[in-house]
Image (tube, helix red, strand yellow):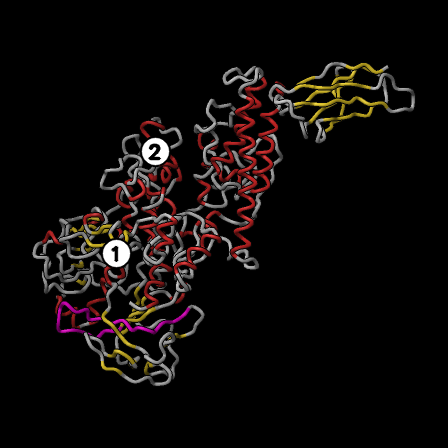
Amino acid sequence: MGRKAGVVLAIALVALAILPAMASASLTNEYGLNYAGQSACFGCHGTGDAAKFTALHSGFVTQGITPSLPDTWTMIRAAGNPPQVPGTGGALFDGGGEYSISGLTWLTLGNYNANSATEYLFFKGTTDPTKMPWNLIEGLAAEPNGEWMIAAEEPGTGLLDVSYGCQRCHQLGSTLPKASATAVAAVPNPAATIAVSATTARQWARNDTKTAAEFMTDASVSYPGMSIQCESCHGTGAKVTGGHMGSGTNVNTTLEVLGQSQVCGQCHGSYTTVAGTAGLNYGYTPNLPLRDFVDVNGVTGGQSYTKIPTVDEFMAAPTAYWMFPNGSNARGNHYYYNEWAASAHSYRSALIKTDPDAMAYQAAGNGHYSTKNMDPNLSGCYKCHTGEGYLKSKGAKIADNFTPTVDNVGYMGQECADCHTGHPSAVGAEDTVREPDQAGERSATGLSKGNDSICEDCHNWQYEIFGTTPAYAPVADLAAHASPSHPQRETLEGRSMVEIADAGQFMPGAKCEECHMPKTNKNANRISHGMKPMLPGDAETWMTAAGGAYKGEDSCSNCHGGATRTELQGSIDDWQAEATMQADKAAAAIKSAQKRKEYSLTDKKKPGYTLVGKATWNYKVFENDASSGVHNPRYIAAGLVKATALAKSVGGSFKVIAASPLVKLGRTGFVSGKLVNGDRSSAVGAKVVLYKNGKGTKQVAMTDAGGAFSFPITAKGRYTVVWQRASDKITHLMSATVTVR
């Protein structure tokens, strides 16, 4: 297809117009698959979520030309009258084409009213069943801004037309011939009853009262099966007595079927054909394994669709790979399914890596979670680590009739349906993605603020899900897994660290997906679903190496347009270097503190248990947040500095405590001292509080760079100083008493 075809499908698959009413007959195709048809579905599901569907998928193809052409036009032809070139291979024109507006029957692909460009088909008809009777005009599109694009990219060539070839996804029940396919098995669908042959018609579903010959000569025969209908996702192709609601066919309604990403991946993916089948996803219905029809890991152009190259591999052949070294789309068009398959979201915990339904990420040996081993009572983890658990805990309609057990969850990873609603009202509409947890519900239980992004529903420290509170405990091995797990939400909001003030967001208003899902592919028209940020430095290096045709976005420049990619990467490098340096210091301090007498790994009565526990918590926040400081640079650095101070204070003491011997009336004396940490370094920035005659005063001081402090006093008494190493009273260290007369 032409340059706009790819844009239209991935951006939209939309149109506001509803398909025309159809006769009550069921639909069939040249493989013998059967469908109830859209009008039958809308007979019962014509309102609510199903009605929204007409504004998106099922309205992708509409009759006529939208938007309306200027009234003065009678023909569509490029400016300058480029020379006409008679068509070959079933085309009217191979260049310089002119097309009658009223003399041809037209279909519009795409949705002009949903901010997407459109393309156009006209009915040419055919006497050869293996030829598509609809042709696509190359170079004709209507842009969302109202501008008609007519041979804009090749004005010297003008318009031309080609046989329409994207019906397998744009239309219901598409079929094609295949000379080498001589048995029904070429369509691995048990509902298919007609063998594929070299003369099978290249068409799509039609009323079962019509014939393939009529499809070839009468444009109206195409209408009942056109567009992406309900049964593109819900259909089985099976003709039965009765069937769903008396429709004469069975449909998919269960989470077990509709929750699988292959339902979307049948069109929003790239793949190769499984040997011996008719081709790609022809004959596929979502109740069957897509892997029987296509190979999402297939090799095209010398590289697998799901291969994530190393940096060295990519730089050696930068245009050879479908993905960048970070797992983001490099040159794919319909590619969401492939990126997802290679990402951690595709991990299905009920499977093992050799299972045929294990996607590329899991098949490579990645992933570790197991509900049976890690959440056998379904107490919380499964609510995010399995797609079934997430949708059920979310109250999603698709999971209404699903009852989770330890044996039936984990066959879904984080699939398309976990994040995306099944019947969004329009492309880019708020209901395209599920609503994040609101204040007081699910992952935001007990919170006054809801999640800003659906990502935060799972990428949080989970205490709200479990109904528990944080516990600050040391660990024997700092490299071992320890809480808090995935505290991204709390770190973004500046409330994940202990013993420092909350900081709020570093980039207020920025949502997870704005950084983690840029349009990285070379045409910058596909949102990445690898979920990895495209660092500006990487984008500059990789796309420069790939050449000027690579125009993909990085994660920063759209919002920070006043800075170069080099400058933006410099900021990121500085943040990560500072955080990593502070983390290294904290880790060293924690390991050192574990050797001191005041420390205990198990005895909570020892101050070192709490001090090292809290230091470890801050360190693990940094480690488990996994942004190396980018999510909240100043806050993360401050928390790690505090972790170092907490750990160093284990075994600390008052090296000096002294006071003025007497205070005369109207004069000022002082209580002074010096603190040292357990490693004998000066305790810098430590909080000390002055006590007089056993009672706390309101005098608070912070030690200087040498660990020294001083309190002014104006009255005699017995003075002590308390070093508040942490907010917990057990960590407070009291000095000797000094008397002032």
| Mark sitting on residue 300 | 1
Please state the extent of the stretch shown in magenta in the rendering. Answer: 122-143
Q: Where residue 335 sits in the image (x, y, percent)?
A: 32, 54
Task: Report, in whole angstroms, how far the alpha carbon at label 2 lies from the one at label 1.
Answer: 31 Å
The residue at 36%/40% (across/down) is: 391
Are there few (<14), some (14-19), or many (20+) residues within 10 Å of tag 2? few
The spot of residue 72 in percent (x, y) is 38, 84
Query: Residue 322 appears at what percent x and percent y?
Result: 33, 54
- Residue 195: say if magenta: no
Specify the amino acid type for callout 1.
Answer: Thr
Q: Is residue 248 visible?
A: no
Q: Compared with residue 82, is residue 467 higher up or lower down, i.e. above or below?
A: above
**Mark 1 residue element:** strand
- 601 sits to left or right of 88: right
Task: Determine whether 27 is above or below 85 in the image.
Answer: above
As shown in the figure, which amino acid type bears the numbered disc 2? His
Q: Quadrant of residue 519?
A: bottom left
Q: Earlier in the sequence, mark 2 or mark 1?
A: 1
Q: Secondary structure at mark 2?
A: loop
Answer above or below: position of 332 versus 135.
above
- What residue did someone put label 2 on? 368
**Which image quarter holds the N terminus?**
bottom left
In the rendered image, which quarter is residue 697 located in? top right
